[in-house]
Amino acid sequence: MSKDAIEIATEVLDTLLKFMGIEGKVKVSSPGLPAVLDIEGQDLGILIGRQGQTLAALEYITRLIVAGRLKSWLPLNVDVAGYKRRRRESLQRLALHLAEQVKLRKCAISLEPMPPDERRIIHLALADHPDVTTQSIGDGENRKIVISPKA
Amino acid sequence: MKDLVEYIVKSIVSEPDKVKVTEENSDQGILIKLEVSPEDKGRVIGRQGRVAEAIRTLLRVKAARNETRVRLEIL
């Protein structure tokens, strides 16, 4: 991603935080594709929200404004104190652990409801697994993953 | 409160000069009224109301910080 684009994205996110009354510092934690802007500061749980909904809204609005400025849509992720990165790692571990359980017990296991990006992490983690398959069931906020043994 | 809405909306519409934001205080909290040109209305609402809902989510963070409640009406 170009340096200008990252600078614009950082400035947009900084301005949003200022208007939201949040004291946080925006750092570029990955300049590649997608670029990751990580917000650092004290007491930022309020920026994550239930099931990460507030963070998703902040990311969406940041992308919209940046896309408007640059006249093109950029792959851009917003994180809060590494929350998404840590969450991804723990979901990947959880996926592999549950896949083992499914294989041993030969019965399906369903997970807690999760937002789309988190379900995606689980699907991808088990996509090439030799013994289990994954699917999402349910609607909206209740949509969740079921891990089943391969027939 | 209204400066957050103004910044977001003016950045995503095609006619920023026609954006009008007013803010009213009542015992139920703050009411923000947003007016944009008719052509821009779709942009600030978004598909299935996604943009408006995201703006409301960010407003709620600020409202929580100020220990108040906030409503956003798009006129």
Image: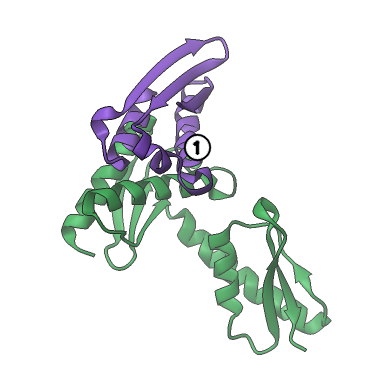
Chain colours: A green, B purple
Q: Residue at x 48, y 32 (%)?
A: B61
Q: Which sits in the foreground, A73 or A82? A: A73
Residue A50, by quadrant, is: top right
Q: Chain of mark 1?
A: B
Assign the N terminus of chain B to one quadrant of the image: top left
- Up the image or down, A91 lies above or below B56; here it is below
- Up the image or down, B24 lies above or below A38; here it is above
- Up the image or down, A118 lies above or below B58; here it is below
Q: Is residue A92 left or right of residue A110?
A: left
Q: Is residue A57 left or right of residue A146?
A: left
Q: Residue at x 79, y 83 (%)?
A: A104
Please tell me how crowded label 1 is: few (under 14), some (14-19), or many (20+) other residues with Cα within 10 Å. many
- Determine the residue located farthest toward the front in the rendered image: B38
Counting from the top left corner in percent of width and height, residue B74 is at 46, 29
Q: Which residue is mark 1?
A: B57
Classify mark 1: helix, strand or loop. Answer: helix
Counting from the top left corner in percent of width and height, residue A117 is at 53, 61
Amino acid on which disc 1 is placed: Thr
Residue B42, by quadrant, is: top left
Counting from the top left corner in percent of width and height, residue B66 is at 47, 21
Q: Which sits in the foreground, A97 or A148? A: A148
Q: Residue at x 31, y 40 (%)?
A: B13
Residue A105, by quadrant, is: bottom right
